[in-house]
Every structure is written in structure tokens, then in C-alpha cells.
Image: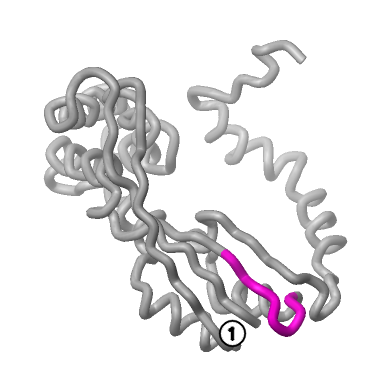
Amino acid sequence: MSETDKLFAGSIPENYDRYLVPLIFESFARDIAQRAAPFEDAAFDLVCCQFGVMFFPDRQSGYREAKRVLKPGGCFLFSVWDRIEENVFANDVTNALAEVFPSDPPRFLARTPHGYYDTALIRSDLEKAGFSSVVIDTRADQSRASSPRHPAVAYCQGTPLRNEIEARDAAKLEAATDYAALKIANRHGSGEVAAKIQAHVIAAIA
């Protein structure tokens, strides 16, 4: 496979999802999901999900399904990002965009990937789904990049935050990315940059 055959960049991912998925993939996706769905009860020792539950449309249903397929004493192990203020580059980008679009700040990062951080709520949701024991470990680390532009592009153009920017003014995508990079550089330096990231790692026992 050539390198160009593997390059999904620019507007390709958005158009792929918007047009190609319903055109040729949707019916096959339903079929394969139906084939995968009838897992037996108590079939697994471990269900694992890294930084995914924030995007579940119905967490209670997802948690109950995880519990259903776990053996008694089995573990549902997953991670979620802590609040955006504990994840510095994401917060820097969000604050920068609030200056670019002061009347309608793009809040995707705070709302979704960093929106399910309340450990009391997480524990309550899991207990309601029937898990008997929930252990939550909050873990901090360092996010590192070769330049301030790296996290700016990652967040502004590599996540659905891009859709929010373009919905406000598609012509401002590059300028907004540049401004986020400038704000990161002003705070962290113009060379290699590093900043705190923090997440919760949850182990729920069936």
C-alpha cells in the first residue's frame, strides 16, 4: 500500500463520515454489529475501554451491558479524562479559542472529552448499573510535544473541535490554530513543550 493510500487528511475524514459511510458502509455495520451482539452472559473476566465512555450516548446501558458479559468478580476497567483545568494544553486551546470567538466560544473539549470527570457521578452511575465495588485512581502525567503548534493542531484540527471552529467561521481555522499555538508558546515556550495531563482510571467489579 502506498503512503498516499493511507493518508486521511484535510476534509477527507469529514466527507468520509458524512457521505461514504451512509452510501456503502452503514448496512454492513448494522450486520456486523448484530453478529457481534449475542455474547453470552458472564463470558469475560475483563472488559476494557480507554477514554471512550465519555462518548457513550447512554452510559447506563453501556455499563449494564459490560456487567452482563462479565463473570462474577470480573472487572470493567476504563479511563476518563479529568476536568479540563487539569489538562493544560486542552485548557490552553479552549481559552485561546474563547478569545478568537468571544461571543460563542467553542466548548467541545470541556463539554465532551473532559465533561465526565465527576468521580461521585461515575461511582453512582456504575453502582446503578449493578457493580458491587468501584475503585477510582486519579493519575497525572506529562503531555509532551515537539513544538507549541503540535497540540494546537491536534486539538483544533484533529478533534470535533474543528467542526465548531468551522461552524463559526470556516475561514478562521488556520488563524484560530495559529492563535492557540501562540498562546501555548507564550505560556510554555517556543521549543519542545510539556504540560500536565490527568485522568481517572476506574476498576468496577461485577
Q: Left or right: where does residue 170 sit relative to residue 36?
A: left
Residue 145 figure quarter: top left
Q: Is residue 112 visible?
A: no
Residue range (magenta): 70-77
Q: Residue at x 50, y 55 (%)?
A: 51
For the image shown, how many numbered marks are present on the structure?
1
Q: Compared with residue 61, is residue 33 higher up or lower down, i.e. above or below?
A: above
Where residue 147 appears, as percent x and y from the top left, is 30, 21
Figure quadrant of residue 18: top right
Tell whether position 95 is magenta: no
- Left or right: where 31 falls relative to 50: right
Q: Residue 23 appears in which quarter of the rendering?
A: top right
Q: x and y percent of residue 66 in the render?
A: 67, 73
The residue positioned 25% from the left and 18% from the top of the image is 191
Q: Position of residue 65 (x, y in %)?
A: 68, 76
Secondary element under disc 1, as helix, strand or loop, is loop
- Quadrant for the C terminus in the image: bottom right
Residue matched to label 1: 131
Q: Is residue 111 above or below residue 25?
A: below
* Relative to 181, residue 86 above or below: below
Q: At 77% across and 15% down in the image, what residue appears?
A: 1
Identified by mark 1, the residue type is Phe
Query: How far from the left and from the top, in percent, is residue 110?
Result: 30, 55
Residue 14 visible in image: yes
> Residue at 56% of width from left, 27% of height from top?
12
| Magenta span: chief secondary structure | strand
91 or 17: nearer the viewer: 91
